[in-house]
Image (cartoon, grey):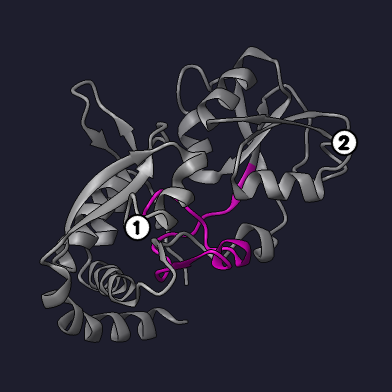
Amino acid sequence: MTLKTILATGLTLATVTAGAAQADQVKIGIAAEPYPPFASLDSSGTWVGWEVEVIDAVCAAAKLDCVLTPVAWDGIIPSLTGQQIDAIMASMSITEERLKTIDFSNPYYNTPAVIAADKAMDIAPTPEGLAGKIIGIQASTIHQAYAQEYFKDSEIRVYQTQDEANQDLFAGRIDATQADSIAMADFVGTESGSCCEIKGAVANDISILGRGVGAATRKGDAELQAALNAGIATILADGTHEAITARYFNASIYSE
């Protein structure tokens, strides 16, 4: 679907869905674990970050009364299907496997998956380059699925959060980690991540890595899905998405 089609469809849906959707509070599930620069708690205990601002903007544009609801990552899809939350906006990639259980809005960002490792290590982001190495991966992510499929000659060490994997990379307990390029760029830009660098993007496999990040909704919740699509289309069209992105990144993280 082209950006032009997304915008036209979403803006048309906005007038249809806004009146019905704005009456009820919408619980937007985010990962309880910090995932900077997308979402993390500041010193006052407030959730901040690029994705938090995007959620606020999408909900405002769609005239939805949204409340952030932190949920442990490994239980976030069950929380959605079990109706503890109404949607997920937590850097969740749109994959065929997930579409068997839940639905998704149109994408609101899309970035590659990369390998990060110590600067002194000559590692290529390929199965051959990582053979015999220990790779840290966050559980229940596209990166775990990808690593298990492609890095069969590596030792895969699974962590509950990406932050834990990053800490072990810094400590030298693992050789590399695979994660989203923006999250890794944020990590290697910190003091604890200064040991490391991004070695490059892994080969793209859309069947595993998906076609971007969208807002997840329950199967059959067409009204909320339409409202979120309308909100996403609006912030892409009116420059809000670009303005939020400019506060965090040096380039767009949205691609068709």
Q: Is residue 105 magenta?
A: yes
Q: Within 10 Å of the Cα at label 1, are there few (<14), some (14-19), or many (20+) other Cα atoms?
A: many
- Left or right: 255 in relation to 153: left
Amino acid type, mark 1: Ala
Q: Residue at x 36, y 84 (%)?
A: 4
Look at the magenta stretch and give its main secondary structure.
loop
In the displayed structure, 29 sits above or below 171; it is: below
Camera-nearest residue between 19 and 13 = 19
Q: Where does residue 141 sit, x and y in percent of width and height?
A: 59, 46
Q: Dot 2: within a 10 Å radius of its alpha carbon, few (fewer than 14), some, or many (20 or more) residues? A: some
* Residue shown at 79% from the left, 30% from the top: 122
Which residues lie in the magenta part?
87-114
Q: SS class of the residue under badge 1?
A: strand
98 drawn magenta: yes
Q: Which amino acid does the dot numbered 2 rest on?
A: Ala
Q: CA distance from mark 1 to mark 2?
A: 38 Å
In the rendering, at what x and y percent does residue 249 appear?
37, 46
The residue beneath circle 2 is 131
Compared to 192, does 253 lie above or below?
A: below
Residue 87 numbered tag? 1
Give the residue furthest to the front. 82
Q: Is residue 40 above or below residue 4?
A: above
Horizontal side of residue 7 vs 60, given as left or right:
right
Which residue is located at x 42 percent, y 59 percent? 109
Secondary structure found at label 2: loop
Residue 56 x %, y % = 20, 53
